[in-house]
Image (cartoon, helix red, strand yellow):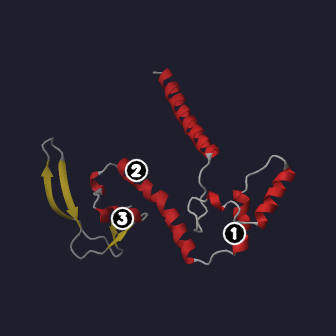
């Protein structure tokens, strides 16, 4: 990210390949180090740029904002891929510990604490009690199919976000 610099031992003289004057009068000079000069990279190494280069995307022709926008998908997906690969390569937790965790997560909460405790005890006694709600039945993946309340909550959240954005646009337009 910080460019390249010659290795220690005295900076070699930069060679000018050629100069060109553009039609608008600006001068463009192409410079390089002599052949055989050993260079060292400085700054952060952005591995995602290698990915885009391999895919064939020319980052040199893009604006700084476009390059940063291209970095977002990899910044979001790579941590999940690392977690998935790490979970596949490491030893899983004991089945009993996982069952207790997922039973507690899957059992609906009751308003009455006594009834809630009873429901949890029933679920602890029968850990696969709510497996019929699994999005991928027969697998170890614990994704649950969304219910009506989940879908309604998601829709209301989206409407809330749209409302906040519209409010911000309206407030921004007041001073215009």
User: Residue 101 placed where, x, y %?
Assistant: 72, 64
- Residue at left offset 56%, top offset 40%: 155
Quarter of the view holding residue 57: bottom left
Do the CB atoms of the residues marked 1 and 3 lie less than 8 Å apart? no
Query: Within 10 Å of the Cα at label 2, are there few (<14), some (14-19), or many (20+) other Cα atoms?
Result: few
Q: CA distance from mark 1 to mark 3?
A: 36 Å
Residue under circle 3? 51
Q: Is residue 142 left or right of residue 8?
A: right
Q: Which element is circle 3 on?
A: helix
Residue under circle 1? 98
Q: Nearer the viewer, residue 84 or 110?
A: 110
- Residue at left offset 76%, top offset 51%: 109
Quarter of the view holding residue 138: bottom right
Total tally of numbered discs in the picture: 3
User: Residue 172 placed where, x, y %?
Assistant: 49, 27
Residue 46 showing in the rendered view:
no
Q: CA distance from mark 3 to mark 2?
A: 15 Å
Q: Earlier in the sequence, mark 1 or mark 3?
A: 3
Query: Within 10 Å of the Cα at label 3, are there few (<14), some (14-19), or many (20+) other Cα atoms?
Result: few
Q: Earlier in the sequence, mark 1 or mark 2?
A: 2
Q: Nearer the viewer, residue 7 or 168?
A: 168
Quarter of the view holding residue 2: bottom left
Q: Which element is circle 1 on?
A: helix
């Amino acid at each position: 990210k910080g460019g390249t610099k010659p290795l220690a031992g005295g900076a070699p003289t930069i060679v000018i390949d050629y100069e060109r004057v553009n039609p608008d009068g600006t001068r463009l000079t192409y410079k390089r180090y002599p052949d055989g000069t050993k260079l060292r990279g400085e700054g952060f190494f952005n591995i995602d740029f290698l990915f885009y280069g391999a895919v064939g995307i020319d980052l040199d022709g893009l604006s700084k904002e476009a390059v940063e926008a291209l970095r977002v998908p990899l910044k979001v997906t790579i941590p999940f891929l690392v977690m998935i690969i790490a979970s596949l390569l490491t030893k899983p937790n004991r089945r009993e510990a996982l069952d207790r965790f997922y039973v507690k997560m899957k059992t609906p909460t009751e308003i009455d604490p006594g009834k809630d405790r009873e429901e949890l005890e029933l679920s602890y006694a029968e850990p696969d009690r709510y497996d019929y709600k699994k999005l991928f039945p027969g697998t170890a993946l614990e994704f649950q199919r969304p219910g009506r309340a989940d879908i309604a909550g998601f829709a209301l959240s989206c409407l809330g976000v749209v409302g906040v954005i519209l409010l911000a646009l309206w407030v921004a337009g007041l001073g215009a």
